[in-house]
Image (tube, rainbow, N blue to C red):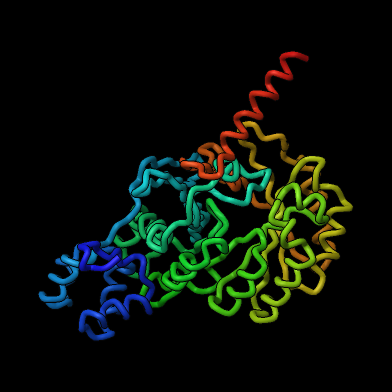
Amino acid sequence: MSDRNHVKTNLLNLDAVQMREWFTARGEKPFRVSQMMKWLYQRGVHDFDQMTDLSKTLRTTLNEQAEIRLPEIAVDQASSDGTHKWLLRLEDGNCIETVFIPEGERGTLCVSSQVGCILNCSFCSTAQQGFNRNLTTAEIIGQVLLASIQLGQFEGPRNHRAVTNVVMMGMGEPLLNYDNVVPALHLMMDDEAFGLSKRRVTVSSAGVVPALDRLAQDCDVALAISLHATENELRNELVPLNKKYPIEALLDACRRYADRERRLSITFEYVMLDGINDQPRHAKQLIRLLKGIPAKVNLIPFNPFPNSSYKRSSPEAIERFQKIIAASELTAFVRRPRGDDIDAACGQLAGQVADKTRRTRRLQEQAVVLKQAGGAA
């Protein structure tokens, strides 16, 4: 949509390259990009008239043709453990969720990439909400900017940073929204924007193999893979995407990714489901599968949600699993549940999704049938 139609450009949709094109098209010098990005992402200023090193003429142009538009905070929740969750309302009325997890000097922001999720993983609350659409670059980077504002990042010393790490582990599959996610990743790592190091920006994927290969060429970030099973038959059930890209193809893509960036380990996420994937044989299979890949394993105690048929593995089973992994060359961590009292823990993000997949309706119908069958019994 063009300026001729009086539609303003949301500058949050533009990474440095795109912003340079925007300014150049208006006769401005490339250095304006550096000025604008510093105002937006390092000072948190969104009023063009306050950007004092821009010419008056340029500020007039910006007011006429551009805007800085963030998602709206619908609900603001704080957990007893310090975790913070925001329900953010988008222009179309859909809502997404963003979570901040503080731990010592580290502040990790869990960012969403889609309204809902199309992958339908059976252990994930987000999947039960269905899917509506991809987020724009502005809606993705806007989560980082909004959280930074809410956490007072721009109010203290210039070197103060509330958000030290970003993980694309919120609602949605990031690599199915590739064209909007990658520009947002560039902004997170651009020295003139948020300036996060590549080690502190992580993309989590269920395994969209072609996009993994593309990401290896386009964007130098840390990678986390939602594995959750060691056999294709079980992973087909837990992560239906596996039917298209089975474990063998996924791990080959991980090896290619690791060959490009040897100094970074790939994190393999493994949700611990009681009696499903938490037995010693599964741990031993996992060790064999990951042989030759610079990897670490993140064991995630299952976080329950309404109408889920799964249960969390016992602490004893999780500890046993971890010890088997640790006895190999791999490192295994147990992720401590954070924010589960406000449904902000891994797998619990739901948002408010106008479902285009009709998945929520089917699940509701199934729940009624099961309840009636139970009553009849």
On screen, residue 377 above or below 182: above
**Residue extending furthest toward the left:** 56
Q: Nearer the viewer, residue 343 or 1?
A: 1
Q: Quadrant of residue 254?
A: bottom right
- Residue 25 location, x and y as percent? 25, 80
At 26% from the left and 83% from the top, the residue drawn is 24
Can residue 333 be spotted in the picture? Answer: no
Can residue 90 be spotted in the picture? Answer: yes
Left or right for 186, reference 275:
left
- Residue 97 location, x and y as percent? 46, 47
- Residue 286 location, x and y as percent? 82, 60
On screen, residue 208 above or below 277: below
- Residue 189 location, x and y as percent? 45, 73
At 73% from the left and 19% from the top, the residue drawn is 373
Q: Nearer the viewer, residue 131 or 80?
A: 131
At 69% from the left and 56% from the top, the residue drawn is 241
At 34% from the left and 65% from the top, the residue drawn is 12
Question: What is the tally of numbered marks visible in this picture?
Answer: 0
**Quarter of the figure that contains the C terminus:** top right
Left or right for 270, reference 101:
right
**Quarter of the figure that contains the N terminus:** bottom left
**Residue extending furthest toward the top:** 376
On screen, residue 53 above or below 247: below
